[in-house]
Image: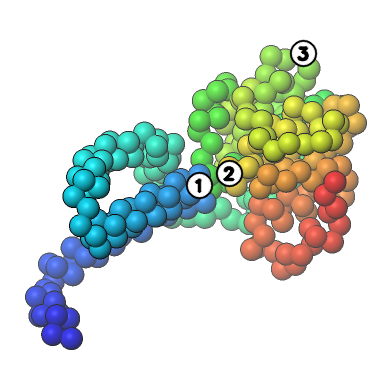
Amino acid sequence: MTDILWILQRLDGLAILDIALVSVVFFLLLLLVRATQAVPLLRGLLVVGIIGVLLSGLAQLPTFGLILRSGIPALLVSIPVIFQPELRRALERLGRVNEMLVSPRKTELEVLIRKVTDGAQKLAAKRQGALIILERDTGLQDLIDTGVLLDAELSPELLLTIFDPHTPLHDGGVIIRRGRIIAAGCVLPLTSTSIDDFRVGLRHRAGIGVTEGTDAIAVIVSEERGSVSIAHSGRLIRRIDNDHLESALITLAAPNRLQRPSLLSQWIRPK
């Protein structure tokens, strides 16, 4: 109790401002890595740090303490390398301050989903294979860099043109960011999960793979069967009919904005 009173007596306006600024910095850092692949890495570093502090403090381990103190500079140097995608994403967000403060409206999301749905249905009717990735909170800049930068307005007609078998970009994936086709012909990672179904081809495996470590949504059109599937969180939802494709995408993209969040579970049967 005496220590607490001593601390409170030393607090002044400048100290409170200092604490507030440090809190805001840590809050923004956590906000930037939220729902990204950096979260497990942060947890691992935190666990290692706590264990190291406990071992060096509770026991007299001079050698271990020396190794721990020597490893801290190396750890600080490795942090920018480990969190390179997140740091680049943070700098991109700083250049788009207005987009950080204003969330996309529901109508904008519905227009985006409607265009993707219309394009996927037309591609399926023509039996043109396609892989459409909807970027969400997790940045996909590393995958975007593997393709051809377009930054074009999304439209069903443009999707039909990109995935035409006679065009050079039809083999890769299209990544959509904030309602625009940011890149096409992107090379996507294949899933590391073993799939016994031989009918699941490379396009579907790539759709699953890109959603395993991110919160992205993948829309896959099969050129062999003319069907549309959705990959999300490493799971594949196959052969979705046209009547439910749009509602399924809206449910996955913004489940908290729907009055009936259980709509998807009423008709989806993963196979």
- Residue in front for this viewpoint, 36 or 49: 49
Q: Residue furthest bottom?
A: 1
- Amino acid tagged 1: Thr
Tell me the distance, in whole angstroms, between the alpha carbons under discs 1 and 3.
36 Å
Residue placed under numbered mark 1 in the picture: 36
Residue designated by label 2: 214
Please state which amino acid type lies under the numbered disc 2: Thr
Q: Name which quarter of the figure residue 225 lies in.
A: top right
> Which badge, 1 or 3, is on the more N-terminal residue?
1
Q: Secondary structure at mark 1?
A: loop
When the figure is inspected, residue 160 is found, relative to residue 54, above or below; the finding is: above
Coordinates of residue 151 in the picture (x, y in percent):
56, 29
Q: Residues within 10 Å of mark 1 (few under 14, many from 20)?
A: some
Q: Give the residue drawn at x 25%, y 63%.
A: 58
Seen from the viewer's position, the closer of residues 138 and 91 is: 138
The residue to which callout 3 is attached is 166
The residue located at (69%, 53%) in the rendering is 252
Which quarter shows the N terminus? bottom left
Q: Seen in the image, is 198 located left or right of residue 20?
A: right
Checking the image for residue 217, the label placed there is none
| Residue 84 seen by the camera | yes
Q: Position of residue 134 (x, y in %)?
A: 64, 41
Q: Residues within 10 Å of mark 3 (few under 14, many from 20)?
A: few
